[in-house]
């Protein structure tokens, strides 16, 4: 069974440019998370989906970040415009449903804003 | 709010036993999870404690005490490949998952 797939693995952009990350969760997983991880720190939740619905986006900087999960499967996370401080690893994770205790993570997208 | 604290770094020798503690200042959560992350890799699930007590999975064990707001991950018979970062994470109602800052474990020969 394929795990959580993210693309691209690496992205370098200039500040003020837009960028998008894509995530394909494990088939059948209803819950999808986007996390941000800075070097040497733990993942920080940006947004969580239950199927197509964003049920927790309180940590998402909505002035520049947006996300969508069409049809409750794949998800994209967008930043526009990117700032230097957005350089980090963006992790996508999925879990079966609200009763499941294990989240499966993708390899992440390492974003460098120059 | 939620707050989880872990030591930033732990060093141990191959074959030894190491305990990574996690203290939290929160309530109303379902349980405590542990994840392992190698440099450049994805976090991977190790264990989950929904109830107080010890859960054992091979060389790894995890413990939770809700009354003490405390948990730990115990790694036995350390191997070089265990060098990684370890994160405790609180599972909330509605499948919320909040992570601690992580503990970097270095295993030396």
Image: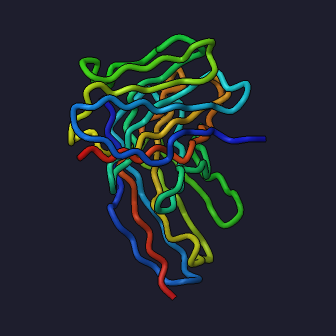
Taking B14 as reference, is A5 above or below it? above
Q: Is residue B52 left or right of residue A110?
A: right
Residue A100's image quarter?
top right
* Count of marks, rendered view: 0
Taking A108 as reference, is B37 above or below it? below
Q: Position of residue B82 (x, y in %)?
A: 56, 70
Q: Is residue A68 left or right of residue A38?
A: right
Q: Position of residue A83 (x, y in %)?
A: 21, 36
Between residue A49 and residue A109, name the one nearer to us.
Answer: A109
In the rendered image, which quarter contains the N terminus of chain A? Answer: top right
Q: Residue at x 55, y 63 (%)?
A: B74
**Residue that lies at the very extreme toward the bottom in this rendered image:** B109
Q: Residue at x 63, y 31 (%)?
A: A25
Taking B84 as reference, is B33 above or below it? above
Between residue A33 and residue B14, name the one nearer to us.
Answer: A33
Q: Position of residue B89 (x, y in %)?
A: 46, 42
Q: Position of residue A26 (x, y in %)?
A: 68, 33
Q: Is residue B21 left or right of residue B15?
A: left
Q: How is the image coloured?
A: rainbow
Q: Residue at x 45, y 60 (%)?
A: B85
Q: Is residue A101 left or right of residue A56?
A: right
Taking A34 as reference, is A13 above or below it? below
Q: Residue at x 43, y 20 (%)?
A: A67
Between residue B57 and residue B109, name the one nearer to us.
Answer: B109
């Amino acid at each position: 069974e394929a795990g959580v797939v993210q693309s691209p693995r690496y992205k370098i952009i200039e500040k003020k440019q837009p960028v998008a990350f894509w995530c394909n969760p494990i088939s059948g997983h209803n819950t999808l998370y986007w996390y941000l991880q800075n070097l040497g720190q733990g993942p920080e939740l940006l947004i969580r989906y239950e199927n197509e619905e964003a049920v927790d986006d309180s940590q998402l900087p909505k002035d520049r970040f947006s996300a969508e999960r069409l049809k409750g499967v794949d998800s994209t996370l967008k930043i526009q415009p990117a700032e230097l401080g957005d350089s980090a690893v963006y992790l996508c994770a999925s879990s079966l449903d609200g009763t499941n205790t294990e989240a499966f993570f993708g390899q992440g997208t390492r974003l460098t804003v120059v | 709010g939620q707050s989880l604290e872990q030591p930033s770094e732990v060093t141990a020798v191959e074959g030894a036993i190491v305990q990574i503690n996690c203290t939290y200042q929160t309530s109303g959560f379902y349980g405590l999870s542990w994840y392992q992350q190698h440099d450049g890799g994805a976090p991977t699930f190790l264990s989950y404690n929904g109830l107080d007590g010890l859960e054992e999975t091979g060389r790894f064990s995890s413990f939770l005490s809700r009354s003490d707001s405390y948990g730990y991950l115990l790694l036995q018979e350390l191997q070089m490949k265990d060098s990684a970062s370890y994160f405790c994470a609180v599972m909330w109602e509605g499948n919320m998952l909040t992570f601690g800052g992580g503990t970097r474990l270095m295993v030396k020969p």
